[in-house]
Image (cartoon, coloured by chain):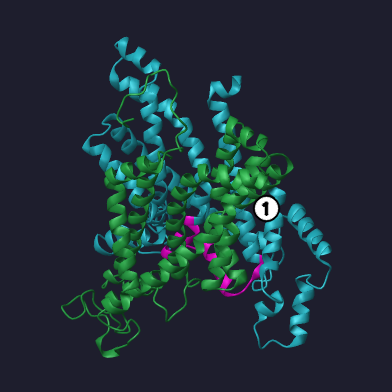
Chain colours: A green, B cyan
């Protein structure tokens, strides 16, 4: 049966997320958004992984007589106030910030998806309690609660992981819960249960594959938000601590020279934006290919 | 919900690994001063008694304790700093509506044309744009290069405060604009194809009137709802941007409290922000309910 044949108009469309692997791949290959996003992300990851080979200088090597140099052939993006090469620092900072953003995204993703599934599938008191918990976390402005937690737990990488594990799951839980609640009433869930499958099996083998695309698309957005938050914490002095290079601290250090050496603050920000665009395109492209939004 | 927020703020202090009093005073503090602070913070009481005291203090006095640095109630400190921050938030909302509405209208009217594609790039780029960095770029452009606005601070003459709030508010609003543009555009597209619009056009109502009177009014309500959803993000961004421009609002109160390890003040700011979010969302919900006849009938 050819995929291109027109279905009769009276047949209702199949559920949006239930698409076979071939159709997904075919759509993915034809999506310029996804392809450009993947290419940009690949470039980003390669530059982070190979930073030690790509960087022309040691990112922490100081040269106090060669500080605050403008971009030149030797230092393509100039040097900072301690004479460190800005290009090398941006490359190495990418390693740090991307690693933290990706690692910090894992626990909220797993916890959020599971809570959303359980909440939507069982409903009742459990659903109510999880719902109140979500409401409470959402009431706090994202930065206020993240900053407060990082302050309480301790600044630096550890504090960042704890903060996102505590607050990052709500987005997934909300979205997954809504979809699961809608799917719970469908015939195939009842059939699976009637066939003697346990709750756990229905949730993990039948519901999970249906909500996963949506959650993965959200994951891309969340990684971007976490990365921006990590950079913001660095800027505020609460994130990655010196001497480890980080885009946020670089922007902060450059602010002192903003009237004359504007690029010191502007360039690391461009790296952040590049990362944001890459992952955002991947997320949009995946969303289109999976036909979820 | 308010109860949950108060509980969360209470347990914030319990997140501290080890003894909060020792963390506040540092490693070299004498055991006596640690013990004194423990009793000042009520840490020597049983957990339930602490929670009870905290809740009583919050609900009767609107207070999370006494600042360890300024020795005044956190309520007083917050009420002193809050007006600037709230002005900033209000101005940022105004800016983002002024920026987002025309963009969304243009994009929706020229769907799938070049303008539309350009406008649709905005959310993709905007998502990964750190608000504080946008603030710095605005400083470079408008304060350092063009010298239209001050680099930071609030100024002294009566006209200065408003002028100094323009760039910070613009930075915050640029973070809010992308999601606003995205949903307003799709909202408008839906209204454009609604039956009543076709009817209006068929009745030869001038296109301008259809757009400004009928369509925008219908798209305004979802925008209001969306502002409610984003208000928490907005307040958080404002606190960070205050740091960039050296504005003495809640943000600088929070960050100075953090560097002084002034725990009651950190809790107070967090509580105040969360309660403001809850309140503003409720008000916006009520406004939508008042404005939308369909909601009243339902």
Q: Which residues are magenta?
A: B237-264
Per the image, label 1 sits on a secondary structure element best described as: helix
Point out the image quarter for the N terminus of chain A: top left
Q: Is residue B21 left or right of residue B173?
A: right
* Image location of residue A42, percent across then percent down: 31, 61
- Identify the residue at image location x=29%, y=11%: B204
Q: Main secondary structure of the magenta part?
A: helix
* Image location of residue B193, percent across then percent down: 36, 22
- Identify the residue at image location x=36%, y=40%: A23
Q: Is residue B55 above or below residue A103?
A: above
- Say few, some or many: other residues with alpha carbon within 10 Å of mark 1 (under 14 / 14 to 19 / 20 or more): many
Q: Is residue A260 above or below residue B122?
A: below
Q: Nearer the viewer, residue B68 or A66?
A: A66
Q: Is residue A151 above or below residue B280?
A: below
* Image location of residue A286, percent across then percent down: 38, 46
User: Can you tell which quarter of the image residue A12 is in?
Assistant: top left
The residue sitting at the top extreme is B203
* Image location of residue B39, percent across then percent down: 79, 74
Residue tagged by mark 1? B5
Q: Is residue B97 above or below residue A238?
A: above
The residue marked by circle 1 belongs to what chain? B
Q: Is residue A52 left or right of residue A222?
A: left
Residue A158 seen anywhere in this rendered image of the structure: yes
């Amino acid at each position: 049966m050819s995929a291109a044949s027109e279905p009769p108009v009276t047949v209702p469309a199949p559920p949006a997320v239930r698409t076979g692997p071939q159709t997904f791949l075919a759509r993915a290959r034809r999506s310029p958004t996804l392809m450009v996003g993947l290419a940009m992300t690949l470039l980003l990851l390669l530059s982070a992984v190979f930073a030690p080979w790509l960087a022309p200088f040691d990112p922490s090597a100081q040269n106090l007589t060669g500080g605050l140099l403008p971009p030149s052939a030797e230092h393509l993006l100039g040097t900072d106030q301690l004479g460190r090469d800005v290009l090398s620092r941006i490359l190495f900072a990418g390693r740090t910030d991307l690693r933290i953003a990706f690692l910090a995204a894992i626990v909220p993703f797993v916890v959020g998806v599971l809570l959303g599934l359980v909440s939507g599938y069982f409903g009742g008191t459990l659903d109510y309690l999880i719902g109140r918990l979500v409401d409470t976390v959402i009431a706090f402005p994202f930065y206020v609660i993240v900053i407060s937690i990082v302050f309480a737990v301790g600044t630096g990488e550890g504090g960042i992981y704890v903060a996102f594990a505590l607050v990052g799951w709500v987005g997934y839980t909300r979205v997954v819960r809504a979809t699961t609640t809608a799917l719970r009433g469908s015939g195939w869930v009842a059939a699976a249960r009637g066939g003697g499958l346990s709750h756990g099996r229905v949730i993990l083998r039948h519901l999970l594959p249906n909500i996963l695309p949506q959650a993965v698309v959200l994951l891309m957005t969340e990684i971007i938000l976490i990365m921006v938050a990590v950079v913001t914490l660095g800027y505020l002095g609460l994130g990655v601590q010196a001497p480890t290079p980080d885009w946020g601290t670089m922007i902060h250090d450059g602010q002192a020279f903003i009237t004359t050496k504007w690029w010191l603050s502007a360039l690391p920000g461009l790296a952040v934006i590049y990362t944001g665009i890459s992952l955002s395109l991947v997320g949009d492209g995946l969303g289109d290919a999976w036909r979820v939004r | 919900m308010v109860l949950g927020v108060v509980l969360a703020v209470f347990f914030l202090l319990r997140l501290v690994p080890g003894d909060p009093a020792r963390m506040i005073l540092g490693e070299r503090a004498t055991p006596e001063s640690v013990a004194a602070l423990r009793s000042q913070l009520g840490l020597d009481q049983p957990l339930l008694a602490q929670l009870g005291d905290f809740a009583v203090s919050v609900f009767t006095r609107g207070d999370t304790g006494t600042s360890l640095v300024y020795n005044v109630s956190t309520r007083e400190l917050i009420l002193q700093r809050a007006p600037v921050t709230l002005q900033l938030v209000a101005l940022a909302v105004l800016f983002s509506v002024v920026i987002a509405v025309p963009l969304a209208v243009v994009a929706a009217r020229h769907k799938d044309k070049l303008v539309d594609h350009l406008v649709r790039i905005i959310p993709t780029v905007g998502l990964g744009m750190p608000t504080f960095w946008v603030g710095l770029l605005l400083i470079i452009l408008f304060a350092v290069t063009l010298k239209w606005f001050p680099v930071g601070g609030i100024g002294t003459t009566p006209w200065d405060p408003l002028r100094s709030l323009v760039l910070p508010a613009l930075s915050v609003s640029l973070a809010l604009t992308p999601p606003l543009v995205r949903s307003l555009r799709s909202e408008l597209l839906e209204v454009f194809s609604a039956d009543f619009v076709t009817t209006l056009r068929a009745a030869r109502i001038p296109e301008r009137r259809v757009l400004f009177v009928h369509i925008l009014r219908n798209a305004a309500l979802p925008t209001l709802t969306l502002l409610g959803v984003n208000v928490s993000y907005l307040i958080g961004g404002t606190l960070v941007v205050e740091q960039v421009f050296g504005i003495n609002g809640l943000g600088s109160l929070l960050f100075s409290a953090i560097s002084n390890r002034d725990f009651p003040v950190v809790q107070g700011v967090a509580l105040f922000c969360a309660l403001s979010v809850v309140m503003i969302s409720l008000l916006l919900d009520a406004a939508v309910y008042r404005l939308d006849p369909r909601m009243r009938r339902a």
